[in-house]
């Protein structure tokens, strides 16, 4: 392949940023996603929630064009995702080899590789893009650090900078807030808001229903099928949560209050947790983008 | 004996000059390619590949081909089989590697046992015969080395993305599968190149040990590769001279020097070494 030939397909801004039509993905015998139909507008900011194994990673893979659905169709601004180099993604901290001999600037420069093309070395504008992206996330002074020297929040900011340097127009984030302290979470949420205002469409996988409901304007509740999509108050209803979390959740009515008991079946035998309907969490291990094997 | 004489005396023999050149070339190339193996966790693959080329080497010998040609064909066949089995079955890749590795090595030994000089040939192939490097071998090593280094320089950023973050390689639409096979192919080429110097059984040390030592003390990939190459050249040249004066087999001596260097860095490196960290933790 020659340098300069690799161009992202044109974006038709009149069409949805992301559209899925009846998307079904199977891995051998198991169905990971079933008949998912979804439209996202430019600049939408969506928390994707659902139980362990609900297909959050598969949904991201399908949108990124890394997994090909057996049925249905994915489109990014009107064309198939496979050619787009505008899909940024932020991996989970545990999926990153923190001892890898790369600096912060090296990682952000990786975002430019698609734009540069083959047999090209970083030009001045690539270095400028890296610097601008690092300044945007407030990590400019850390450019020379090895990535293992960063805190969890700083690492997430570096990966956000990588997506900015990539000029991503669609950003997929895998559990970006997991394991971060509250101030770091605030910083990341603030940055997501800023990025979204540039017209970037953001999808954030989360297992924290409470946080998703409070911090994100749109919630996508997934359990292989799309259970509900919309503003939190419409999505996080007892009926929807029951159908998403199914057998792991029990509704108890005591007086005026409705309680959901979420049974953390896969979390290693911890006791059932008592949660109110608006703060049900699913404290179980999450599959990650990094752990998922590439498609065969 | 003076220092100068120590260095020049062995070079009276043309075979020692060729051995020295081969040691230096291999000392640069193995650690550079080995850096990717260390970062990607490909050590077992490299070891398996080295053993799996044995039938190719023996067949080349029987048919009168250059040894490198037979080794290369066998390496490519083995790499392909490993990829094919792990992709078309539910087996893990390391299992596929184990199956192919052991089977091919057995085939090689079986073929070799039909020859007259069985034990001598086996020892040379397993443990290397750097003193037997011919001028033609040197040209082959040199040519393959230039090819491998050029590819690494040309595709540096793509290989870095693939090694650090395969998922990013996919969303940037890099040809991830082709790059992966290219990397495995370069490992195969490097193994073939080093065969004569250290032999099948020890080539893994040339690939992995200097790169592992360099990784402990470096923060960026180019620095890691450069330091690993430095360690590789130093270990090979020192090993060659020690083997000359002490009359020990050259391949193992080189590997022992590299292993000693690794041990020193592992224990005593500033900041990253075990001792330094223990002291820092205590005080």
Image: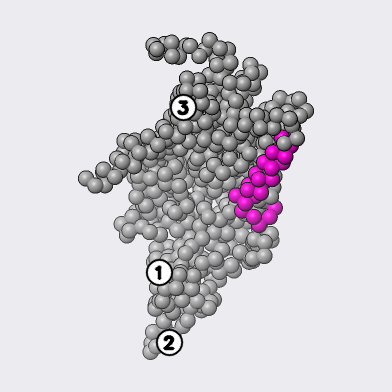
Magenta segment's dominant SS is helix
Residue A276 occupies which quadrant of the picture? bottom left
Q: Earlier in the sequence, mark 2 or mark 1?
A: 1
Which mark lies nearer to you, 3 or 2?
3
Q: Which residue in the protein does label 3 denote?
A: B235
Q: Residue at x 54, y 59 (%)?
A: A57
- What's the CA distance linking mark 3 and mark 1? 59 Å
User: What residue is disc 2 on?
Assistant: A253
Outermost residue to the left: B283
Task: Judge if badges 3 and 1 mark residues of a common chain.
Answer: no
Query: Which quadrant is home to the C terminus of chain B?
Result: top left
Q: Residues within 10 Å of mark 1 (few under 14, many from 20)?
A: some
Residue B29 among magenta residues: no
The answer for which chain carries disc 1 is: A
Q: Nearer the viewer, residue B144 or B135?
A: B135
Asked if residue B166 can be seen in this view, the reply is: yes
Find disc 1 in the rendering and name its residue.
A210
Task: Tell me if residue A180 comes above or below residue A108 in the rendering.
Answer: below
Crowding at mark 2 (Cα within 10 Å: few <14, some 14-19, many 20+): few
Q: Residue A259 location, x and y as percent?
A: 41, 81
* A28 left or right, relative to B265: right
């Amino acid at each position: 392949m020659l340098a300069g030939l690799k161009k992202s397909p044109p974006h038709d801004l009149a069409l949805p940023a992301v559209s899925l039509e009846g998307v079904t993905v199977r891995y051998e015998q198991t169905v990971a996603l079933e008949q998912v139909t979804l439209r996202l507008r430019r600049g939408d900011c969506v928390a994707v929630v659902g139980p362990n194994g609900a297909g959050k990673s598969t949904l991201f893979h399908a949108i990124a064009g890394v997994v090909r659905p057996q049925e249905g169709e994915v489109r990014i601004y009107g064309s198939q995702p496979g050619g787009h180099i505008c899909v940024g993604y932020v991996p989970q901290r545990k999926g990153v080899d923190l001892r890898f001999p790369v600096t912060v600037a090296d990682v952000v420069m990786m975002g430019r590789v698609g734009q540069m093309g083959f047999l090209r070395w970083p030009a001045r504008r690539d270095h400028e893009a890296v610097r601008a992206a690092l300044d945007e996330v407030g990590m400019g002074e850390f450019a020379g650090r090895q990535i293992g020297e960063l805190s969890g929040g700083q690492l997430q900011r570096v990966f956000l900078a990588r997506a900015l340097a990539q000029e991503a127009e669609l950003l997929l984030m895998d559990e970006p807030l997991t394991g971060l302290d509250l101030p770091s979470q605030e910083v990341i949420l603030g940055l997501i808001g800023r990025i979204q205002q540039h017209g970037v469409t953001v999808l954030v996988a989360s297992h924290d229903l409470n946080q998703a409901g409070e911090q994100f304007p749109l919630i996508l509740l997934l359990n292989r099928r799309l259970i509900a999509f919309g503003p939190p108050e419409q999505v996080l209803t007892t009926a929807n949560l029951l159908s998403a979390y199914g057998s792991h959740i029990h509704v108890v009515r005591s007086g005026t209050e409705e309680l959901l008991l979420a049974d953390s079946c896969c979390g290693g035998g911890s006791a059932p947790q008592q949660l109110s309907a608006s703060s049900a969490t699913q404290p179980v291990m999450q599959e990650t983008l990094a752990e998922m094997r590439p498609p065969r | 004996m003076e220092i100068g004489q120590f260095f020049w005396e062995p070079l009276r023999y043309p075979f020692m000059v060729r051995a020295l050149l081969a040691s230096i070339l291999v000392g640069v190339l193995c650690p550079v390619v080995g850096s990717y193996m260390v970062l990607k966790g490909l050590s077992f693959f490299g070891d398996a590949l080295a053993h799996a080329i044995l039938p190719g080497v023996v067949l080349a010998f029987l048919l009168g081909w250059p040894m490198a040609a037979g080794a290369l064909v066998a390496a490519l066949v083995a790499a392909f089989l490993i990829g094919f089995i792990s992709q078309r079955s539910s087996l893990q890749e390391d299992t596929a590697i184990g199956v192919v590795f052991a089977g091919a090595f057995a085939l090689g030994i079986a073929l070799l046992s039909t020859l007259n000089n069985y034990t001598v040939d086996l020892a040379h192939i397993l443990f290397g015969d750097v003193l037997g490097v011919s001028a033609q071998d040197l040209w082959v090593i040199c040519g393959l080395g230039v090819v491998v280094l050029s590819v690494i320089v040309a595709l540096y950023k793509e290989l870095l993305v693939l090694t650090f973050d395969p998922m990013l390689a996919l969303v940037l639409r890099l040809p991830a599968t082709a790059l992966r096979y290219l990397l495995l192919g370069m490992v195969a080429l490097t193994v073939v190149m080093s065969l004569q110097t250290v032999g099948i059984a020890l080539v893994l040390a040339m690939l992995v040990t200097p790169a592992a030592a360099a990784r402990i003390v470096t923060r960026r990939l180019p620095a890691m590769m450069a330091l690993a190459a430095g360690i590789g050249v130093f270990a090979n040249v020192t090993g060659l001279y020690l083997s000359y004066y002490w009359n020990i087999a050259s391949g193992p001596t080189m590997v022992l020097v590299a292993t000693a260097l690794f041990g020193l860095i592992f224990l005593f490196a500033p900041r990253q070494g075990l001792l330094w960290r223990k002291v820092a933790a205590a005080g």
